[in-house]
Amino acid sequence: MSFFETLARDTAEEQGRLFATPQILAGLAGRISRDTYVAYLTQAYHHVSHTVPLMRLALGRLDPAHAHFARALEGYIAEEAGHEQWILDDIAHCGGDRDAAMASAPSAATTAMLACAYEAVGHGNPMALFGMIFVLEGTSIALASQGAASLAEGLGLGPECFSYLASHGALDQDHMTFFRGLMADVGDPEDQAAIVQMARRMFGLFGDMFRSIPHDRSIAHAV
């Protein structure tokens, strides 16, 4: 069994709990309000704006023995830079206030997720960041494209409101193919353990972020 397969197996329970989150299920069905969608985008802005800083932090802490993974992070940084601006554009296009989103504080759940990431990457094994990448990109593949299509139909919004979701569904499929190959090169048991532990924690904390988003359950169950 490859390490990627081990990572997927050892985090399957946590991933299942994430995908059972009511806000995610309702979003995939196109049964959330515009306000809920804007609230989701606002939290996405807060955590996505830390993607590149976290990658740079990990990059700066990797030793020469991990040069291969440092080069991979350099590629990720080049591709991920500026994606938080796509989210702000989506907020504006669907009638939200991009300036208010930028000025807002992240929810307690989003703050906890970021704090966990910074602690692990900044003070523990920086290879742990790949556990977070596994969670965010894997979740994006599973949810983004389907969620964007369902929400567009359910909310009556145009494609300009879903640039972040729609683009990441396809983009992260390519990224995950690369990631699977990259994980084949993780041979150190301590690195493997750090990645698995981070992924388990991130699935839970990412789920908490979704559960913190205000959500009208009557919409979710509408026929």
Image (cartoon, rainbow, N blue to C red):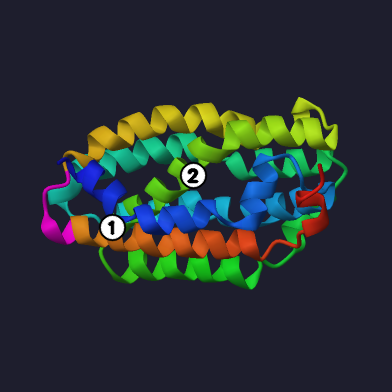
Q: Which mark is residue 183?
A: none
- In the image, farthest residue toward the right: 95
Q: How many marks?
A: 2
Quadrant placement of the C terminus:
top right
Hey, which quadrant is residue 3 in on the image? top left
The percent coordinates of residue 27 (x first, y second) are: 68, 45
- In the image, farthest residue toward the front: 223
| Residue bearing the label numbered 2 | 139
Mark before the other along the chain sequence, 2 or 1: 2
> For the residue carrying disc 1, how many other residues have a C-alpha within 10 Å: few (<14), some (14-19), or many (20+)?
many
Q: Which residue appears at 33% of the width and 55% of the height?
A: 11
Q: Is residue 81 above or below residue 51?
A: above
- Magenta residues (range): 186-191
Q: Is residue 148 above or below residue 12?
A: above
Q: Nearer the viewer, residue 82 or 141?
A: 141
| Residue bearing the label numbered 1 | 196
Quadrant placement of the N terminus:
top left
Q: Is residue 58 left or right of residue 33?
A: left
Q: Identify the element where label 2 is drawn.
A: helix
Q: Is residue 99 left or right of residue 180?
A: right
Q: Which residue appears at 81% of the width and 27% of the height?
A: 158
The percent coordinates of residue 22 (x first, y second) are: 64, 56
One can see residue 216 in this view:
no
Hey, which quadrant is residue 23 in on the image? bottom right
